[in-house]
Amino acid sequence: MLRGNGIGEVVERDARTGQPRSIVLANPDTVRADPDAEGRLQWAIGRTAVERESIWHKRVHAVPGRVMGLSPIAMHAQTLGLALSSMEFGRRWFTDGAHPSAMLTNEGQITQEMAAEAKSRFMAALRGNREPVAMGYGWRYTPISVAPNESQFLETQGYTSAECARIFGPGYAEVLGYETGGSLTYSTLEQASLHLLTYALDPWLVRIETWLSSLLPQPQYVKFNRGALVRTDLLTRYRAHEIALRNQFKVINEVRDLEDMSPVEWGNTPADTKPAPTLDPAADPAAIAGGPNA
């Protein structure tokens, strides 16, 4: 997700199918794939050369003519460039901008010499002194300030932060609370989690499922438990369990597994066919007659 590449060295293969059985993953930053004089790729992990047949490589954001896939950040470099440019512009505006910090005005007519002397005396009174400044008749001090929202700095930074969050998926900016200009709201935490799962996480989960499934013998496959990612409140979750058990498309042990509980012996059968507990007459003599009130 951060590098756009999954790379590893195959250290063991299945003798019958030739599929990798053991892969040692490598940091993509340490992997090189350079063409030799004949145009064939020479792979290396760190300083160690690796045969092409021993490289397991999966990529996202593939670009023609490039062996390595681009990371999501590289695919959105222009967005980051806008963010950096706006930050630099804001820094220069407030530090090197060609604008005065305040204005010292007089309602009457003054000469250039009088203005220079008034400015000099006013600045001398300000330096190293936090006491109030006494000004003569007709003089007025007006500070010049630019509100960040008026100069577009906060809007620009907020926009680029949301765009950077969207690099990894369309749901991150909204879930993280960035202002995106839309009117979409979430009424429950479950809906927010579902939005994040559907629009942001699921494309990456599908990629990983496909890659890992390709390493398994058919018809085996890998699938993430997406239900565990969408966490609901306790009451809603238990109601969903009750509906699943009543309609017999889940059994007790499946529900207990979702709730991080250990399985029970009778939990692999549908709810309506759960065997009744066996009574031990030696432990409960009244059970022989059918109970204490039989």
Image: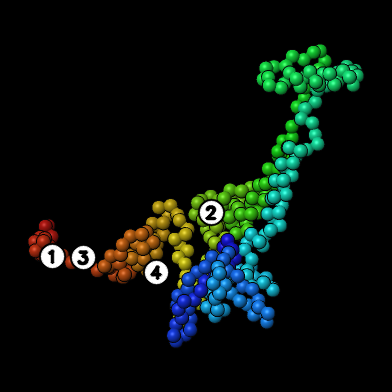
**Which residue is under mark 4?**
249
Disc nearer the start of the sequence (1/4):
4
Against 265, is 139 above or below?
A: above
The residues bearing labels 1 and 2 have C-alpha atoms spaced at a distance of 51 Å
Q: Secondary structure at mark 3?
A: loop
Q: Going 42% across and 54% down the picture, which residue do you hit?
A: 236
Q: Quadrant of residue 125?
A: top right
Disc nearer the start of the sequence (4/2):
2
Against 136, is 48 above or below?
A: below
Q: Nearer the viewer, mark 1 or mark 2?
A: 2
Q: Residues within 10 Å of mark 2 (few under 14, many from 20)?
A: some
Q: Secondary structure at mark 1?
A: loop
Q: Quadrant of residue 155?
A: top right
The residues bearing labels 4 and 2 have C-alpha atoms spaced at a distance of 26 Å
The residues bearing labels 4 and 3 have C-alpha atoms spaced at a distance of 23 Å
**Which residue is under mark 2?**
192
**Which residue is under mark 3?**
277
Q: Going 83% across and 21% down the picture, which residue do you hit?
A: 105
Disc nearer the start of the sequence (3/2):
2
Image coordinates of residue 278 in percent, x first then y, are 18, 67
The residues bearing labels 3 and 2 have C-alpha atoms spaced at a distance of 43 Å
Image coordinates of residue 18 in percent, x first then y, are 48, 84
Q: Secondary structure at mark 2?
A: helix
Label drawn at residue 252:
none
The amino acid on which the numbered mark 2 sits, given as a three-letter code, is: Ala
Q: Going 12% across and 57% down the picture, which residue do you hit?
A: 293
